[in-house]
Image (cartoon, coloured by chain):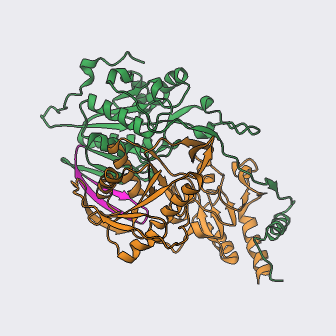
Chain colours: A orange, B green
Amino acid sequence: MKILTVSDINTGLELLGFAEKLSILIPQVKTEALVIGEYTEDQAKEYMVRGAERVYVVEEADIKDPETTATAIIETYNRTKPDIIAIRSIKNTKEAAARAAQQLGIGTISDIARIEMKNEKLTFIRIILSGKVTAYQEVITPAVVLIPPGKFEPPKPTEKAGQIIKIPIKTEKKIKTIKIEGKKKAAVKLEEAELIVSVGRGYRTKEDLQIAFQLAETIGAQIGCSRPIAADLRWLPEEHWVGLSGKKVRPRMYMATGISGQMQHIAGIMDAGIVVAINKDSNAPIFQYADYGVVGDIYKILPLLTKRLSEILK
Amino acid sequence: MTALLNPRKIYMLKLYSEAGVLLVSIIVLVKLAIDVSQLRIDSSTGKPYIEEAPLKISDIDRMAIEEAVRIKEKHGGRITSISALTWPPFTKRISEAEMPLREVLAMGIDEAILIADEKLLQADTKTTASVITAVIKKLGGADLIIAGEGTIDGFSGVVGARVAAGLNIPLITYARKVELKGNIIIAERDLEDYIEAVETTIPAVVTVTREINVPRLPTLLQIRMAIKKPLRKITLQEIEVEVEPKIKPFTIEGVKIRRKNIMIEGKTPEELTENLIKKLVDEGVIAPKR
């Protein structure tokens, strides 16, 4: 089986990790990499020592431009005929993958959670229906697999060498970029947080979130939130949004305060260590998905927690 | 539901206003999704009862519908929705589809088309997109095709882009703002780290995010009028498409969430707080300094 990873030069090593994982499950995996955009020879060699027998390079393409990336995928596909194309699942690359797959007439599997052998068949596993259902997808190759960023670790380096092959492309651009504007970046990297205190509709005003901020500061936690707080009320920037359309987090402890626990929110905390829920409504669904539940008023419990914990941690 | 499509009537005529101005023809892709909030999962076997869960308009597709209606209100034109029935059981779903599709019509869509064919059950995204592409071609195309960025049930997020590739027309994904100026469409793409303003010419496909608008609730009058609007059901034979799936239908099981589900006891907030802290210390989440 031949795997082709598709990425820019900075983000492809984790895809080689995916290829390495496949090579453990099935025999005779041959890995090649397609690098989109600029690169240095040293960087390309890094791909070779981590498993890529060949590194195709399309310098005219840009990973942030789905049109040129799609063309690069199609050209490289036609040249090397891989069985599986692995690409990171971020918005621009997902678009590029979808465009290329439809033109090539091949399938896509979005956002895999893991891979395993099931009944001796290579199976990709996805979580669907807002986190409620696991789908086992047997793969008919060729197929494009969209891999969530950070899912796989880069393989350990070896002594292997390989070759670099440049592929020229011609893209007929239909979309014109007029302007690019950075988003205000909060200092939070919620995906990497060890502890998270998360807030929901149980707070009456934006100012009231202070009681959660104080608790978070006391224990060194980051702040998360449910959809309404980020998307509807806009009390917090999107970086804090935890859930299916927001961030998927994996802290040691996730404390949901004033969050009712819609499935879409739960989908974001599947990999959390301990889940604590504080909500005054004893029927709130969040308690079903919590390790420790406290039925109580966040306006009373949170300040008490902050006070007691600051004494304990002093 | 009304009878099958009359092939002679399939081709959409170019629309002109009384003043002879070309009006916008819009197609909205609407997924009839599983209503996840009503999906029951057997707690002992973990089996999800998909076939019992009702269908609803996929959340983000409501924004797609609303955006189409707003463009029509501004520029005039006609909106057709296309849905493909992909969840089994087939017979039950066909009759069940009528209610959400009437809701689509009540929201301001002029005509709803349902592609209902057993071969489409649990179809992969390539098949779904190919069939939708074929229907759009049969309709004579459209100026603008709008879809949600993803559906709440499958959340593959690729069908809109695949349709654009199938039609070989420009594609703008993840739009949080869309503006039509003559035959130019200008949009803001909402990406992970930045906003990209782009423009292209119509005909084009645009996929939208949740943030683009707040969909209106239909008025009673609109709901009544929706009953009279055309709702057509078509089969693959009528659009002359052969289905050749590239991904096999998946097998499923309920996600097992293993949580301890321990409720902290205490009569007062103080007691509750103390008992919770004890647990956090036991779990090693909090390490007391003394």
The answer to whether residue A250 is left or right of residue A59 is right
Within the magenta stretch, is there residue B195?
yes
Q: Main secondary structure of the magenta part?
A: strand
Confirm whether residue A109 shows in the render: yes
The answer to whether residue B105 is left or right of residue A138 is left
Q: Where residue A154 sits: x, y (%)?
A: 53, 67
Q: Where residue B156 sits: x, y (%)?
A: 47, 46
Which quadrant of the structure image shows residue A41?
bottom left
Q: Residue at 73%, 71% (x, y): give it.
A: A303
B267 w.r.t. A119: above or below: below
A47 w.r.t. A106: above or below: below
Which segment is the magenta one? B186-203
A83 w.r.t. A36: above or below: above
Q: Where residue A102 sits: x, y (%)?
A: 35, 43
Confirm whether residue A129 shows in the render: no
Q: Residue at 12%, 34% (x, y): give it.
A: B20
Q: Nearer the viewer, residue A268 or A169?
A: A169
Which quadrant of the structure image shows residue B125?
top left
In the displayed orientation, state which residue is furthest to the top.
Answer: B3
Q: Where residue A104 sits: x, y (%)?
A: 34, 44
A286 w.r.t. A214: above or below: above
Within the magenta stretch, is there residue B232?
no
